[in-house]
Amino acid sequence: MRDATETPRSSRGAGIVITVVFTLATVLGVVAYWRYSVSSRFIHESLAQFDARGASLDADACVGEVLAWNARCEAMKSMCDQAVPMTMEHCLAARERKEACAALPVEEAPRAQWTFERCAAQGVTRRNKNVCTDAYRALVQFCRTGERGVIL
């Protein structure tokens, strides 16, 4: 027979499970926040580098640099992929791009086949196809906005 002051076993077991789950969730949250912070810092430092390097690169070279940066990006992959339009904007905005924008075939640029052909010329593999497509779309948007930026 149990005393009235004794806690039932199932209540203690549930308390332990809840404590373990809460502790694990807290640890995972701290690790995720730390990883996000490190990734964000890396991307912001990279943008400053693109501001400097973009002045010496033509538009296609900017695409190549962004693709190379994405391949060696030390941040979380999803953040690296999402930063492609931003890095393109920083690279392209480093100097005037009127000649490059004038050379874009306005009627073909929005079509997917145009970007795939440009990516094939860059030697892009199937794995990086979306990153390359995003880079060329950013180039087209940059030119369409009158070199004012990329619509993210």
Image (cartoon, helix red, strand yellow):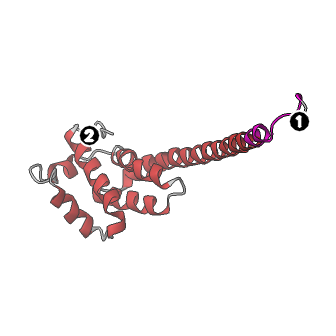
**In the depicted view, which residue is nearer to us: 34 or 95?**
34
Whether the magenta-drawn stretch holds residue 14 is answered as yes
Q: Amino acid at mark 2?
A: Glu
Count up the numbered dots.
Answer: 2
- State the image quarter where residue 114 is shown: bottom left
> What residue sits right under mark 2 in the picture?
147
Q: Is residue 105 above or below residue 68?
A: above
Locate residue 82 relative to residue 72 in the image: left or right: left
- State the image quarter where residue 111 is shown: bottom left
The answer to whether the residue labelled 1 contacts the one labelled 2, judged by CB atoms less than 8 Å apart, is no
Residue in view at x 89 percent, y 28 percent: 5
The image position of residue 75, as x and y in percent, is 53, 53
Residue in view at x 43 percent, y 46 percent: 51
**In the depicted view, which residue is nearer to us: 131 or 54?**
131
Quadrant for the N terminus, please: top right
Mark 1 against mark 2, which lies toward the viewer? 1
> What residue sits right under mark 1 in the picture?
2
Q: Which residues are magenta?
A: 4-15
Question: Would you call the spot at circle 2 few (<14 residues within 10 Å), some (14-19), or many (20 or more)?
Answer: some
The image position of residue 65, as x and y in percent, is 39, 59
Q: Amino acid at mark 1?
A: Arg
Locate residue 137 relative to residue 46 in the image: left or right: left
Mark nearer the N terminus (1 vs 2): 1
